[in-house]
């Protein structure tokens, strides 16, 4: 017999064996108890025993986590952390009761299965497991990988980067191969490699990062292979990310690098490694940054690479030193922080951005709502770029629900005060309705937003994200009641390790001492995210360019009425996220203009220059604020690998450029047609289309089919249609 559809593809996507082992362990416990719901503790025990038996018989097995060399030394407490990931990945078929500590297949599925389904599923899991381990055995070697890059990179750079075989090898094959080494096969370690974004990198690299310290090469400490520009040598280094510290200027950054280097060298042995600044990658610039920020390194000459055994031993030695350093840092942090995980809860694992977004999407689906995956990715990137986002669309499409569920999925709820819904009233006419006012007795009466800012600013809450949903934001004129907030948001600056704004409420404006103590000097902290929902109809007000410049405007157009909720409620999984998940890394373009981000910034800017040349004719061209915001969005997208470059720029064209366009004259139509050429990436017969553009919108699907920027193409076509039919067009007309 064949497996039911809901079971046939559960092992399709996997990076480890844990999903298969979990199913085998669950089925083993179910066969012993003859129950659908079984003890989670017993399943953990079966899970651990299965891996220990394989290890004892010298069969292939994933390496344990947390620097434990053998599964024989692993305890059930560690299994609790490990098993959480496959449980979450299989939440479409599994139910977990965290209070009663039970696990089982969803009842609505289980009751439809034939009695032989579980036997078939067990055989399927065992077969998939063996195939998985077999695929892990390969002929990859560190020496072969380094030699490939050193010898082929100069020639490859003469070819286009897109789909280049060496580029694919470096980005995909090398990280996969390195993860096979037992001292690297650790869930906390991330392996990433790059040959550049858009254009070939001067210095290609292969990095190994502990997720608990950093998930990007721009900051924190990590291990990285750095290839010299002339490919004469490669360095295996323990290094610091250079982008973040450089935001404070070279002098301050170099002081910080050198101080940190001495601190780390005093903490760990680093035996056998060189400890100086004699790394020669390229002259000046980023090469000098790498020299100063390097803690220790091995140097390998390209024409005399050591043996595989030596290269492997060197990497293992450096990884051991790195793990020692990570443990010391985490122990230091643990002494300052209090755990919030209850005894009955499973601990929350460290997640990458893409893994966390997957968990958010799963949570939203578990709650019975359906949004396109790209919408969630886009919403995240928009919040990361600027903590002010506008969600637009017809009433009832789920704008407010998206904000609430997104917040809940990362631990921000109305119960803990991290999610606040503020309904906007039509009679709001100045900032006092939102921020507060002084009454006749000179006491300050805080507005609903001020209460959130006070709570978010408390020391215990500074690493927790706070969401404010301004519901029906444009029932009143946004520029009237929100102007102070918009202006204050533009004053963001760095202060030590925080991002702060100018004061929203000045102490000198408060007469009462208690008010001055509580509200005086209040600013907008970097853990507050403002999201407005808007409908565009005869009861609402349009937005000025001042508002649109400062927000990403996400429009809800995809409505699936035939999405039905589950008839059986299931446990929802929440992965609380630190504020770092959403907090911006960049305030000015100079902050981001470093290394691998430079091609992204320059490519985006070149495209914007073309677009601005078109927009100038109707006085709708953009300034530095929008340029910077678009570049930040694209950089964050590349770092998290959520969308293609074209998809990301498409959303920015749709959300930052098109909302500025409206009018009724021929010049507006000409601008829309010129922008359509960019979106389609092909020439149009604009003279004919200026008279009659019906061939574009009479078959929208055909027009959009091969477009470079699909969402923008569809919106431009609708705007052209309105202009033809109504004599006036705007982004807001759909």
Image (cartoon, rainbow, N blue to C red):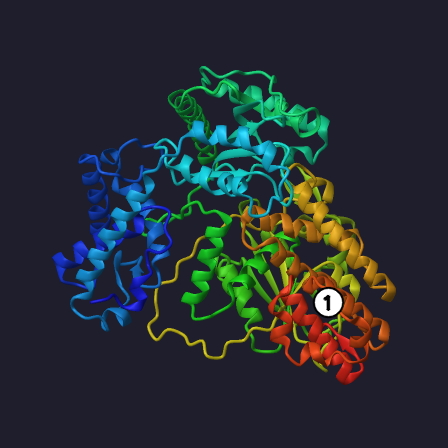
Image location (x, y in percent) of residue 660: 77, 66
In this orientation, which residue lies closer to the viewer: 317 or 346? 317
- Mark 1 surroundings: few (<14), some (14-19) or many (≥20) residues within 10 A: many
Describe residue 481's horizontal placement relative to residue 666 as left or right.
left
Q: Which quadrant is the C terminus positioned in?
A: bottom right
Going by the picture, which residue comes out furthest to the bottom? 725
Left or right, residue 422 beside residue 170: right
Residue at figure coordinates x 35%, y 56% from the top left: 12
Q: Is 680 in front, or is 194?
A: 680
Q: x, y percentage for residue 425?
A: 68, 74
Q: How many marks do you count on the picture?
A: 1
SS class, disc 1: helix
- In this orientation, which residue lies closer to the viewer: 573 or 314? 314
At 21% from the left and 46% from the top, the residue drawn is 45
Question: From this viewpoint, is residue 77 visible?
Answer: yes
Report which quarter residue 394 is drawn in. bottom right
Q: Is residue 293 left or right of residue 656?
A: left
The quadrant in which the N terminus is found is bottom left
Q: Is residue 430 visible?
A: no
Above or below for 680 versus 321: below
Report which residue position mark 1 lands on.
Answer: 676
Is residue 206 depicted above or below 625 in this figure?
A: above
Residue 725: image location, x then y, percent: 75, 84
């Amino acid at each position: 017999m064949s497996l039911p559809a809901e079971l046939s593809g559960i092992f399709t996507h996997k990076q480890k064996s844990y999903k298969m082992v979990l199913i085998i362990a669950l089925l083993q416990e179910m066969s012993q108890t003859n129950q659908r719901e079984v003890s989670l503790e017993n399943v953990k025990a079966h899970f651990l025993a299965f891996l220990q038996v394989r290890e004892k018989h010298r069969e292939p097995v994933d390496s344990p986590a947390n620097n434990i060399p053998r599964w024989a030394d692993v305890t059930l407490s560690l299994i609790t952390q490990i098993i959480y990931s496959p449980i979450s990945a299989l939440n479409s078929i599994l139910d977990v009761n965290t209070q009663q500590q039970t696990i089982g297949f969803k009842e609505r599925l289980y009751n439809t299965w034939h009695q032989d389904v579980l036997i078939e599923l067990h055989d399927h899991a065992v077969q998939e497991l063996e195939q998985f381990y077999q695929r892990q055995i390969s002929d990859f070697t560190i020496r072969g990988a380094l030699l490939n890059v050193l010898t082929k990179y100069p020639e490859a750079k003469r070819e286009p980067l897109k789909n280049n075989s060496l580029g694919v090898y470096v980005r995909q094959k090398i990280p996969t191969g390195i993860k096979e080494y037992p001292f690297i096969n650790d869930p906390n370690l991330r392996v990433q490699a790059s040959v550049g974004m858009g254009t070939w990198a001067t210095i290609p690299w292969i990095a190994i990062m502990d997720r608990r310290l950093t998930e990007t090469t721009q900051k924190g400490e990590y291990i990285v292979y750095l290839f010299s520009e002339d490919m004469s040598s490669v360095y295996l280094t323990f290094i610091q990310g250079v982008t973040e510290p450089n935001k404070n200027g070279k002098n301050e950054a170099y002081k910080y690098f050198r101080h940190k280097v001495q601190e780390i060298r005093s903490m760990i042995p680093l035996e056998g490694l060189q400890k100086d600044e004699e790394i020669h990658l390229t002259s000046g610039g980023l090469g000098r940054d790498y020299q100063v920020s390097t803690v220790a390194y091995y140097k390998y000459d390209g024409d005399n690479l050591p043996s595989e055994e030596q290269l492997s031993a060197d990497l293992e030695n450096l990884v051991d030193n790195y793990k020692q350093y990570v443990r010391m840092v985490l122990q230091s942090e643990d002494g300052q922080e209090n755990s919030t995980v209850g005894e009955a809860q499973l601990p929350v694992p460290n997640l990458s951005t893409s893994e966390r977004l997957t968990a958010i999407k799963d949570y939203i689906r578990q709650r019975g709502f359906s949004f396109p995956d790209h919408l969630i990715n886009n919403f995240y990137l928009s919040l990361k770029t600027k903590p002010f986002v506008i969600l637009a669309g017809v009433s009832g499409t789920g704008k407010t629900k998206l904000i609430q569920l997104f917040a809940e999925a990362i631990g921000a709820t109305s119960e803990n005060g991290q999610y606040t819904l503020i309904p906007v009233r039509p009679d709001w006419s100045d900032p006092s309705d939102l921020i507060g006012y002084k009454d006749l007795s000179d006491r300050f009466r805080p507005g609903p937003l001020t209460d959130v800012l006070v709570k978010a600013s408390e020391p215990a809450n500074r690493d927790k994200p706070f969401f404010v949903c301004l519901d029906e934001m444009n029932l009143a004129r946004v520029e009237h009641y929100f102007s102070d907030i918009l202006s204050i948001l533009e004053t963001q600056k760095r202060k030590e390790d925080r991002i702060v704004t100018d004061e929203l409420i000045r102490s000198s404006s408060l007469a009462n001492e208690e008010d001055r103590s509580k509200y005086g000097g209040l600013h907008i902290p970097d853990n507050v995210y403002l999201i407005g929902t808007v409908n565009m109809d005869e009861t609402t007000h349009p937005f000025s360019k001042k508002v649109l410049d400062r927000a990403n405007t996400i429009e809800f157009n995809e409505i699936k009425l035939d999405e039905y909720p589950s008839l059986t409620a299931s446990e929802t999984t929440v992965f609380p996220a630190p504020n770092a998940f959403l907090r911006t890394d960049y305030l000015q373009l100079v902050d981001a203009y470093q290394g691998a981000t430079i091609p992204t910034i320059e490519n985006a800017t070149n495209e914007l220059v073309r677009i601005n040349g078109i927009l100038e004719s109707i006085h709708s061209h953009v300034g530095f604020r929008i340029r910077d915001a678009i570049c930040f969005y694209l950089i964050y997208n590349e770092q998290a690998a959520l969308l293609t470059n074209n998809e990301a720029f498409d959303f920015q064209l749709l959300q930052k450029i098109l909302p500025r366009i409206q009018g009724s004259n021929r010049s507006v139509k000409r601008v829309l047609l010129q922008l359509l050429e960019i979106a389609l990436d092909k020439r149009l017969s604009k003279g004919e289309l200026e008279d009659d553009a019906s061939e574009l919108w009479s078959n929208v699907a055909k027009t959009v089919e091969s477009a470079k920027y699909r969402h923008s193409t569809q919106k431009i076509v609708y705007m052209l249609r309105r202009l033809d039919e109504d004599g006036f067009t705007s982004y807001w007309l759909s």
